[in-house]
């Protein structure tokens, strides 16, 4: 089954802790994205990566970090510097941005992070 | 500034009562407009991609249309299982970023 998996589904964090959210895809997609979704708001882009070992900040990157060591994996770390991390986090992927066609993003099931 | 606005924020319909959802956008050269369905607590599910004004796409009871300034998602004779939040997103030419609206929450009553 091809798709995007995110783990864990629910995550609880204490104040001052760093936590890492996992995102794995077996779609052979080149580009991967992390979004944050808050109630009543659209998805906001945190980071995106077009190829392995390269990534760019999105609109709300402060307090977050990512790595892209493998094509299949794009983990997101929520650091203690993120002041309001409670949200629903979504990972997405798509084929190579320069593939010559306008390719939609496909999303994982999400991780709900709650700060205690 | 690239922007996406969806209306209404919420829509309540009776089963069988057709209606439309709106997605207005301002973007510096549209590369694609995307519609997604999102159920509570789940990731968005891809529905349609529209590339140019005048284009239409259909899937079951849903039909998406596109003009130079907005897109509509028409729902014909909806059923309770169509209840969900519908998200619209746009991608500008030359960029790999997508801009999302805040969604329309559709509730279809039996």
Image (cartoon, coloured by chain):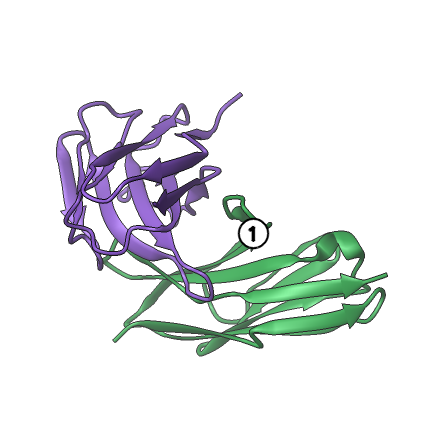
Residue A49 makes an appearance in the image: yes
Q: Chain of mark 1?
A: B
- Compare residues A115 and A26 and report the one nearer the observer: A115
Q: Residue at x 29, y 72 (%)?
A: B2
Residue A94 makes an appearance in the image: no
The color chain B is rendered in = green
Depicted B99 relative to depicted B60: above or below:
below
Which quadrant of the figure contains the N terminus of chain B? bottom left
Depicted A23 relative to depicted B3: above or below:
above
- In the figure, is residue B14 to the left or right of A55? right
- Compare residues A89 and B53 and report the one nearer the observer: A89
Percent across and percent down for residue B52 are 46, 66
Percent across and percent down for residue B4 are 40, 71
- In the figure, is residue B2 to the left or right of B35? left
Percent across and percent down for residue A24 are 36, 27
Q: Residue at x 16, y 49 (%)?
A: A63
Q: Residue at x 75, y 51 (%)?
A: B81
The color chain A is rendered in = purple
Q: Secondary structure at mark 1?
A: strand
Residue where numbered disc 1 is placed: B38
């Amino acid at each position: 089954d091809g798709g995007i998996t995110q783990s864990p589904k629910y995550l609880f964090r204490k104040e001052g802790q760093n936590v890492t959210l996992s995102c794995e895809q077996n779609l052979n997609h080149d580009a991967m994205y992390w979004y944050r979704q808050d109630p009543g708001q659209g998805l906001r882009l945190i980071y995106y990566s077009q190829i392995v070992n390269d990534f760019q900040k999105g609109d709300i990157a402060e307090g977050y970090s990512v790595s892209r060591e493998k094509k299949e994996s794009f983990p997101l770390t929520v650091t203690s510097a993120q002041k309001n991390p409670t949200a629903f986090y979504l990972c997405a992927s798509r084929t190579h941005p320069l593939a010559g066609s306008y390719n939609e993003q496909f999303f994982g099931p999400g991780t709900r992070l709650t700060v205690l | 500034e690239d922007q996406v606005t969806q209306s209404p924020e919420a829509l309540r319909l009776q089963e069988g009562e057709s209606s439309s959802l709106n997605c207005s956008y301002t973007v510096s050269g549209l590369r694609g407009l995307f519609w997604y369905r999102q159920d509570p607590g789940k990731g968005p599910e891809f529905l349609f991609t529209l590339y140019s004004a005048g284009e239409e796409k259909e899937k079951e009871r849903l039909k998406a249309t596109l003009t130079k300034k907005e897109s509509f998602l028409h729902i014909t004779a909806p059923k309770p299982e169509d209840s969900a939040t519908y998200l619209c997103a746009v991608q500008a030419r030359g960029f790999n970023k997508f801009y999302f609206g805040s969604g329309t929450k559709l509730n279809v009553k039996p």
